Amino acid sequence: MTEASSEEKKAGDPTVVENTRSNGPATHGGIGAERRVRLDTSRMKSSYCNVCNATSTQEEVVLNLGLNQSWDRPDGDIDIAIQHRVIMSPHAAKKLHGMIGKLLDEYQQRYGVLK
């Protein structure tokens, strides 16, 4: 798969991530055909979060992501602005767990062990 040059990529163009499946010879749209995942980033927003809280039920895992801006207040309450709530199935959460574990392993190999 080739990457488009920065001139060819425009904001909001779908990004091809990877071929996701090949279970034998490719057929025309049938079982075993290679499929590409396209991510539409045209409405994506980025935000910095330094706090994460997680809860779960049998049916879902919930991540609350937010920002602690109380770094200059040694006493009193800590106010955290929850900016995002991500709700996913336990299967998706397990996949996320594996991806984050691999990412952190690679990070520590490059930059040293996190404490």
Image: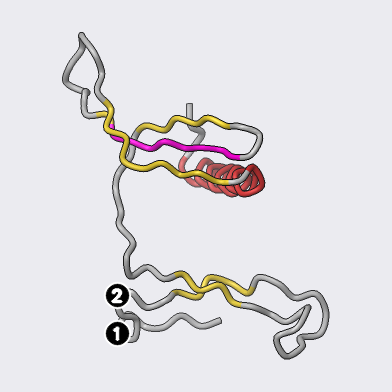
Mark 1 residue element? loop
Q: Relative to 35, is 97 above or below?
A: above
Q: In this view, does 65 lie to the left or right of 90?
A: left
Looking at numbered disc 1 in the image, what kind of residue is underneath it?
A: Glu
Q: Please tell me whether mark 2 or mark 1 is closer to you in this view.
A: 2
Q: Residues within 10 Å of mark 1 (few under 14, many from 20)?
A: few
Q: What residue type is labelled 2?
A: Ala
Q: Residue 84 carries which label?
A: none
- Residue placed farthest to the top in the image? 75
Please report the residue visible at 42 percent of the width from the left and 33 percent of the height from the top.
52
Location of residue 87 with respect to 23 vertically, above or below: above
- The image quadrant that residue 22 belongs to is bottom right
Q: Where is residue 33 in the image (x, y as percent from the top left)?
A: 73, 82
Up-down relation of residue 60 to residue 27 (above or below): above
Q: Quadrant of the N terminus?
A: bottom right
Q: Which residue occupies 71% across, 72% down?
A: 21
Within 10 Å of disc 2 (Cα), the crowding (few <14, some 14-19, many 20+) is few
70 and 60: which one is in front? Answer: 60
Which dot marks residue 7? 1
The residue beneath circle 2 is 11
Left or right side of 44 for 22: right
Please tell me whether the stretch drawn in magenta is mainly helix, strand or loop.
strand
For the record, the magenta segment spans 60-67
Q: Is mark 2 on a helix, strand or loop?
A: loop
